[in-house]
Amino acid sequence: MATVNNKKKKQELTVEQRINRRNFISFTTFFVVGGAMFGGWKWLFNAPEEAEGITAGARKPLRRALNKTELFFRRIFSNDHEVKLYPPSMAAKEVRVNGDIGIDDEDYNPDSWQLSVVKNKKETLQLSLADLKKLPKTDIVFDFKCVEGWDQIQHWGGVKFTDFIAHFGLQQQARMKYVGMETPNSEYYIGLDMESALHPQTLLAYEMNGQPLELEHGAPLRLIIPVKYGIKNLKRIGAISFSNERPPDYWAEQGYDYYSGL
Amino acid sequence: MKEIKEKHSLLMRWTHWINFPVLAIMIWSGMLIYWANDVYTITIFGHTLLRFFPDWFYQLFNIPQRLAEGMAFHFLFMWLFMLNGFFYVLYTIFSGEWRELMPNRRSFKEAWLVLLHDLHLRKTMPPQGKYNAAQRVAYTAIIFMGIGSVLTGLAIYKPVQLYWLCWLCGGYHIARILHFILTVGYVFFFLIHIVQVILAGWNNFRSVVSGFEVVNKQDPTI
């Protein structure tokens, strides 16, 4: 009897204490965890920039996260996933020009243009536009997407990259992991993972709205790759190369995601 | 006599307080991204009432020229936002707590009465459970908004690989607008939420940290 009474008394006494006790535990946890989260945020926000290499300009942990996220989303990449197509009548007549990095030489003469395809250290193909135009022409009307957030329905025509690979006997090179492209003056350069480059909608384009490309749009030959943001759609391709390491990429050196895939 | 009345589960409290900073970072990094193509306005009959965002706003939060940084943060914290939301939704479904949370047949009508009551236009409020009708509507809506943000976000993040999702969201262009509108929605939700929490008082606030409320109850044995 006595013990039961005691227990009862204890319980009655502890209502207030239990409130205080639980408040103490909860709020201590709340502030400790909250402080830790704030500390974690400060750590991330003040994290040092990555060492300058193929990628640069991002906080170290955030670059790691971008690269890991790339691996995740590459799992859902498929050649069967194609960008939506539109009728040519919906294509913009005034096609947006967003930059002239790498194509702003005032004395540039497009007639002297040649495409260098670096097969390996010893062998480089030199191709003219006429060489490329012998291949079947493919047209694409799709919603072009800029990393800035704008989009525009545009109409491009040219050689499918897969046709290009097959026709010029680059199957060996296409087994490597990356494709690199750069402007003739080497001031703008991009790297592509091979699967994106070999996507059936990737074009080496020499026409826009059925007309020869204008200089500001990348004449004589530019890349149109709908599975990437505009930053990878290099204008005025001077050289194409292949490698198993990530080729240099202009915007990946400015803190952007290397993959930049859509 | 004071009594402890259990109110919020541990998981609900953790996910709530994790979501708060994570969503704040998502909104902030989202603004760093939005700045690069800040074309949205509220325009009626050719009059632009509001531009997202005015210059003073950009300067105040130091937003310009930080697109790459914004994307890097956004694409890390999206994982936390999704995982946290996923755990909350899963828990709410399997614990049965959704029954106290989802609006029922009466909720939409009663939510209106609650609103009138809160605006001091009506003296009484219909009897309510753990959440009143307005809360049921609001707290369920915010979860669907969160799901909407994830879906529209994925649609503009991978519009080619997830082309069917992009199509479901009305296409790339519309999906980006919806993603933005939902974010404006969170800001409004937050403002009203804060005012309501302050008005509801300490006992209510504490229950979202400690899980219980203190109620006064007559001792039936006396």
Image (spheres, coloured by chain):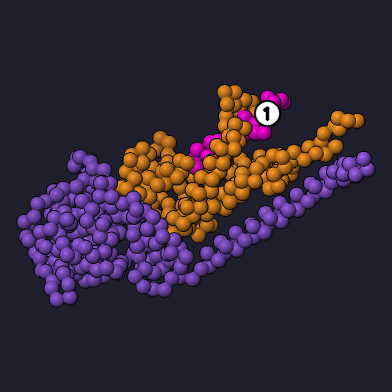
Chain colours: A purple, B orange
Q: Position of residue A190 (x, y in %)?
A: 27, 64
The residue lying at 80 percent from left, 47 percent from top is A18
The residue lying at 53 percent from left, 57 percent from top is B60
Q: Position of residue B167 (x, y in %)?
A: 33, 39
Furthest-bottom residue in view?
A122
Residue B48 as seen in the image, left or right of residue B187: left
Residue A180 as seen in the image, left or right of residue A58: left
SS of the residue under disc 1: loop
Q: How many marks?
A: 1
| The stretch drawn in magenta includes residue A179 | no
For the residue pair B97 and B28, the one nearer the viewer reads as B97
Q: Amino acid at mark 1?
A: Gln
Q: Is residue A54 above or below residue B193?
A: below
Q: Is residue B182 above or below residue B71?
A: above
Q: Position of residue A207 (x, y in %)?
A: 15, 53
Residue A11 as seen in the image, left or right of residue B138: right
Q: Please state the chain letter of the residue tagged with numbered disc 1 in the rendered image.
A: B
Q: Is residue A9 above or below residue A167?
A: above
What residue is disc 1 on?
B128
Furthest-front residue in view?
A1
Q: Position of residue B82 (x, y in %)?
A: 49, 48
Residue A238 is at least partly visible in this image: no
The residue lying at 81 percent from left, 36 percent from top is B216
**First to last magenta residue range:** B121-146
Residue B78 as seen in the image, left or right of residue B218: left
Quadrant for the N terminus of chain A, please.
Answer: top right
Quarter residue B218 falls in:
top right
Quarter residue A182 falls in:
bottom left
Q: Is residue B96 above or below residue B22?
A: above
Residue B99 is at least partly visible in this image: yes
The residue lying at 62 percent from left, 41 percent from top is B193
